[in-house]
Image (spheres, rainbow, N blue to C red):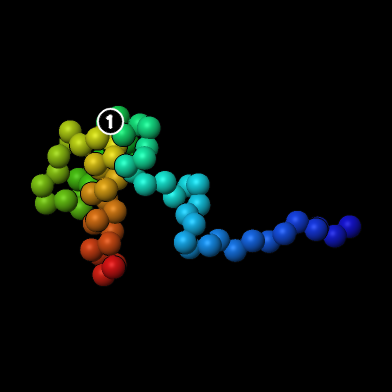
Amino acid sequence: MSDNRKTSERDPARPCNLEKSPDDWTTGKAPMTGAQAPYLEMRCEEFDPGLSEVEASKRGDALRAESHGC
């Protein structure tokens, strides 16, 4: 039996549901996650443990962009 489902390529102009801007998160004021804290603590010269989840996500994105030359 063949699989007739369509294979679709992601349109870069139309972000995937999983690629939601941190500014649009409903949990924006929640404390940073357990995964965010050690990453930022390791990468940041000045680690702020009081960052919100959104602030930590933005800081992590900026650090990844800096390290990849984006």
When the figure is inspected, residue 63 is found, relative to residue 26, above or below; the finding is below
Q: Residue furthest bottom?
A: 69
Image position of 24 (left or right of 13): left
When the figure is inspected, residue 7 is found, relative to residue 19, above or below; the finding is below
Q: Nearer the viewer, residue 58 or 24?
A: 24
Q: Position of residue 66 (x, y in %)?
A: 23, 63
Q: Position of residue 6 (x, y in %)?
A: 72, 59
Q: Nearer the viewer, residue 35 or 21?
A: 21
Q: Nearer the viewer, residue 20 or 65?
A: 20
How many labels sit on residues? 1
What residue did someone put label 1 on? 29
When the figure is inspected, residue 25 is found, relative to residue 65, above or below; the finding is above
Q: Kindly identify the residue that appears in the image at 20 percent across and 53 percent down.
A: 43
Q: Secondary structure at mark 1?
A: loop
Q: Which of the image's four quarters has the N terminus?
A: bottom right
- Residue 11: tell me if it is visible: yes
Q: Which of the image's four quarters has the C terminus?
A: bottom left
Q: Position of residue 2 (x, y in %)?
A: 85, 60
- Residue 38: tell me if it is visible: no
Question: Looking at numbered disc 1 in the image, what kind of residue is underneath it?
Answer: Lys
Quadrant of the image occupied by residue 7: bottom right
